[in-house]
Amino acid sequence: FMTNTHHYLMFFTNTGRVYRMKAYEIPEASRTSRGTAIVNLLQLMPGEKISAVIPIEKYNDDEYLLMATKKGLVKKTPILDYANVRKTGLAAITLREDDELIEVKITDDERDVILVTQYGQCIRFHESDVRSTGRTSMGVRGMNLSDRDEVVAMQLDAQGEELLIVSEKGMG
């Protein structure tokens, strides 16, 4: 994704929280430096990992955030619900105890969504099939999963006509 220093960066974690900062608050580094650890920039809870970063120029009322969890739930929420994020973060989605947020995309309610699982299952549906819910809701079932299977990726059809899937052993 492309961004500039005046955009907000929204950081979504695996535990369902969202943090926000201006892009210029990230320290500039040289081409060969290692960079700054994200835990030094955000007040993350123990065990939290960043699962998605969304750059936002301004909060439009016709845009949504589409989220997917590893247990197959999807959630679509108006982006305006995330306009005021505190330094300590904000609950972006309510998760069950054994679930995690795996992906977040910004969308305009006119895209197809593709969910792919660890065992090679895939589903494609139009995002208008997912009703819009509030910020603290769980979302709706996006895909039924077999035992021990979990969603590993969510993609929108906005990135092109074809989908490349690469396996754990490097087969494409």
Image (tube, grey):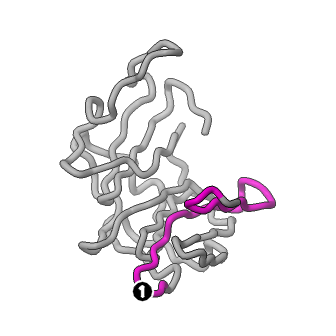
> Horizontally, is 83 left or right of 78 in the view?
left
Q: In the image, what residue occupies the spot 56% across and 27% down? A: 4
Quadrant occupied by the C terminus: bottom right
**Residue closer to the observer: 110 or 35:** 35
The vertical placement of 96 against 104, above or below, is: below
**Residue closer to the observer: 95 or 168:** 168
Q: Which residue is mark 1?
A: 147
For this orientation, the residue located farthest to the top is 30
> Horizontally, is 134 left or right of 94 in the view?
right
Q: In the image, what residue occupies the spot 71% across and 56% down? A: 158
x and y, in percent, of residue 126 in the image: 66, 74
Indicate the amino acid at tag 1: Asp
> Horizontally, is 117 left or right of 100 in the view?
right
x and y, in percent, of residue 17 in the image: 31, 54
x and y, in percent, of residue 171 in the image: 67, 60
Quadrant assignment, res 3: top right
Q: Main secondary structure of the magenta part?
A: loop
**Residue closer to the observer: 21 or 160:** 160
**Residue closer to the observer: 48 or 118:** 118
Magenta segment: does it hold 166?
yes
Quadrant occupied by the N terminus: top right
Q: In the image, what residue occupies the spot 22% across and 39% down? A: 43
The vertical placement of 162 against 19, above or below, is: below
Q: In the image, what residue occupies the spot 62% across and 74% down? A: 128
Q: Which residues are magenta?
A: 145-170
